Image: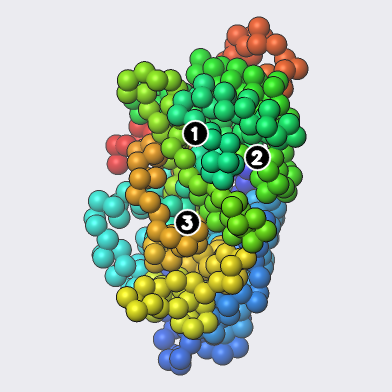
Amino acid sequence: MKNIALRRTLALVLALVMMLAMAACAPNGSGEIDDAYEGDTVLAPGTPFKIVIGSHASWPYDENHKIWQYFKEEVGGDIEINAIPNSEFATKLNLMMATPDELPDLLHILEPPHVINHADSGAYIAIDENMDKLPNYQKFLDSLDPEERDNLIALRTYADGHTYWPLVYGSETVMNFSTWMYRKDIFDKHGLEYPKTIDELYQVCKKLKELYPESYPFCIRSGLNKMGTMGPSFAPDFSIFNYYDYTAGEWRFGAFTETGKEITEFMRKMMAEGLIPPDMTIATSSWEELMSTDRGFITIEALVRINYFNVPNQKINPDYEWVAMEPPAHDNSEGAPRKIAKSNVDPTGYALPNTRDQKRINNAFRVLDWMYTDEAIDLLSWGKEGETYQVDENGKKTFILDGDVTAQVAYGASTYGLYQVIRKEAFEQVVAAGSEVDPLWMTWIEEGAQPSWYLAYNDEESAIINQYETAIRTHAEENLIHFVDGTKPMSEWDAYVQKAYEYGLEDVLAAYTSAWDRMQSK
């Protein structure tokens, strides 16, 4: 739930414009999918069809990707794809919502606020109210374990009880899976063991700094977020921003807790000794250079980064090897948890914008429903045999790669917009260097996903969050950076915490609690 309050504030300003337009021209909701066309493609030739997706900086959209070509061949029609860089997506989405005529037929959502911030304006068509138009999706839902299905749907249920973007499946186990990792070749070269505790992390980083003076051994980007990801090594469920403590049964804002202070002091020591990059907001490109040039040796990152770094760098240095690492515990005490925050959920997927044109909406349902057929799932997971994947004598499928690119870069596999359901074997090959994900890695993750990223608020709760949360978060971010880089003394910590309460922290925590309690009661 990144900067949700800021985006929600802008969305509220736009909502009145959107609501007036939708009210005047909303579809009647009774139209049936037009089955007049029964050709070999989903849409009739020449049918205009617009899709908006995000474009990831590390594996951006490419119209020449084979799996996108297969998608277009099977769907038919005249498909126009607008790929927006992730960094610009929220802003451009707000502009789209202010001009309903600019809405696409399908909009690929990157995170819940892209739905939450606009649902009240009537910007989307409710999926649960139109299941008659989605027979293949219904068949897919029926194939799932009921408890698993209900839990996944709950993560996409808005405060009004409706679902505006249907499930994605197959990626949720490892999508956004973050893990500790280390340069095994460097550790082996110098007879070092990966750290088992936070103190060992500090000690091994000091040793690596001696060996490689120009390095930043604990090489992290998005430093504040990583303080949250590593938080469970210090206390269960901890996040640097808003989080639910499942053990205590209460909402907290980690940046103002004693655990937050302890992590801040640890990072302050690491930066003072040059063991982490001196910029908590280091650019991804600069971080990637450090990671690829023997200047970074331990990190916390998405699992996909192992493959992302190993594949091209092993072509230059065959010994180069990043491997997943068990999270270090807080200390050596009995029962000290070795966990990492649960981030392996997939919030993405297609939503149907309310274009006010029933024919366009029906076409969107038709394409979306096709993506839940077995044929589409296989095609969009693997591509075509002999072109993008091969099958060995045991029937196992593997992507055909030339050794210096990943399936994402080579074919667009598992990139934004190319699946609603993906075969888990295919997805694991993309994120795990061509092999299945080790079940052991899953034991390192905390059991409960933080509800902060999907929690839906009513009007009263939204008003409180809109009023206070941005100032509180900004206060935390600005001060934590200065505490860590040493420009603010730790003697000012208590005053910093007190200021957060003056900004309305207690009211915001109460709003989280109210929304959580309501969701739990359903």
Q: Which residue is drawn at 38% across and 77% down?
A: 392
**Which label lies toward us, 2 or 1?**
1
Mark 2 → mark 1, Cα distance in angstroms: 16 Å
Q: Judge by depth and name the residue closer to the eye, 424 or 30.
A: 424
Mark 2, residue position: 296
> Quick check: 517 left or right of 84?
left
Q: Which residue is drawn at 32% across and 75% down?
A: 394
Q: Counting other residues with Cα less than 10 Å from the Cα at mark 1, is it few (<14), some (14-19), or many (20 or more)?
A: few
Q: In this view, does 372 lie above or below 168?
A: below
Identify the mark at residue 432; answer none if there is no mark: 3
Q: What element carries label 2?
A: loop
Q: Distance between the residues labelled 3 and 1?
A: 22 Å
Cα separation between marks 3 and 2 = 20 Å
- Secondary structure at numbered mark 1: loop
Identify the residue shown where x is 65% and y is 11%: 490
Visible in this render: residue 315? yes
Mark toward the start of the polypeptide (3 vs 2): 2
Q: Mark 1 points at which residue?
A: 193
Residue farthest left in this picture = 146
Q: Residue drawn 34% across and 79% down?
A: 393
Q: Which of marks 2 and 1 is nearer the N terminus?
A: 1
